[in-house]
Amino acid sequence: MSVVVFRAWLARASALALVLLAGPLLGGSRSVLHAQGASPRAPRTILAIGAHAGDMELTAGALLLKQHELGDSIVLLHLTLGEGGNPKMSPAQYGEQKRREAQQAAAMLGARVIFGPYQDGELPNTEEARRYVAEVIREVKPTLVITHWRNSIHRDHSSTHAIVEDAVLLASLEGVKLASPPHRGVRLWYAENWEDAEGFTPYLYVDVSGQMDRWRQLVSSYEFVRGGISSFAYLDYYGALATLRGAEAHRSRVEAFDIDPLGKKQVLNTVP
């Protein structure tokens, strides 16, 4: 086999592997069997939990748009509004603006939105917060939860990771008494965020090539994304990131996610 032919074969194999990787973990929505006309799978619920309103829309919004189109239910849980992020407005005023923006974004996603009881910059990494999120998980009954990676320059993000990771476990335990019955079988993915880059390794690549125009409209619901509050170019950064990850996956645009390192273990009986 020539080098050119081998490289072409490797590119096709890598792209196929990425599709097969993301498909089963999302429940097979884009699996080979489905593409060949097999019976469509039952709708699922995806719960995206962000430290601040806007976090999950920026990092996983294109995936959420795609999965909603495929029939999945989408729920957004914003643990805080991120009301302290506008130096020109009081937290109370900006909090009301962020709430309206989050509701607009949720409507565009066809999602239910839940607002947590916590304050921006003061998200408590406590048992009470874990039980609050565990109760949301039990009530919503997601098959997939998406949240922040563990390391971050923003303590609300790293606190959210710790809270959610433990809440998934608490929600599954019969002995933990909450208002709703236990809910098990939750997969946990971590979204790629510029503030959460330390130690994050893209593991799951999801093709969102057809959702990027709608994603831009979605995240532009937020003034901090459109510009005028922060100097950070959110649209440019996350748009370019989708292009970069797409190039790695031999796709046009991709959103990438990581999982817990223990979940990456593969046990094989023979060489595949």
Image (cartoon, rainbow, N blue to C red):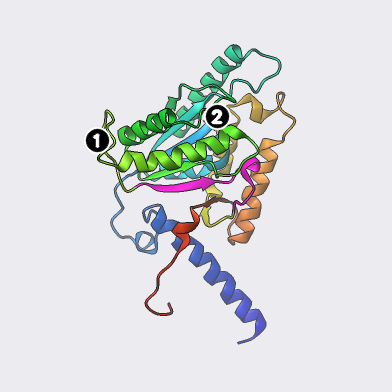
Q: Secondary structure at mark 1?
A: loop
Q: Residue at x 60, y 34 (%)?
A: 155
User: Where residue 181 is drawn, which disc sits there?
Assistant: 1
Whether residue 57 is visible, yes or no, is no
Whether residue 159 is visible, yes or no, is yes
Name the image quarter holding residue 86.
top right
Report the residue that reaches farthest toward the bottom.
Answer: 1
Q: Is residue 122 part of the magenta span, yes or no?
A: no
The residue to which callout 2 is attached is 52
Report the residue that reaches farthest toward the right.
Answer: 231
Task: Name the one closer to the observer, 107 or 146.
Answer: 146
Does 156 sit left or right of 266 as displayed? Answer: right
Quarter of the image with the N terminus is bottom right
Which of the marked residues, 2 or 1, is nearer the chain's N terminus? 2
Q: Which residues are magenta?
A: 186-200
Name the image quarter holding residue 140.
top left
Q: Residue at x 64, y 24 (%)?
A: 223
CA gap, disc 2 to disc 1?
27 Å
Quarter of the image with the C terminus is bottom left
Task: Name the one closer to the observer, 30 or 114.
Answer: 114
Task: Name the one closer to the observer, 122 or 215.
Answer: 122
Q: Position of residue 80 (x, y in %)?
A: 52, 25
Task: Name the one closer to the observer, 242 or 122.
Answer: 122
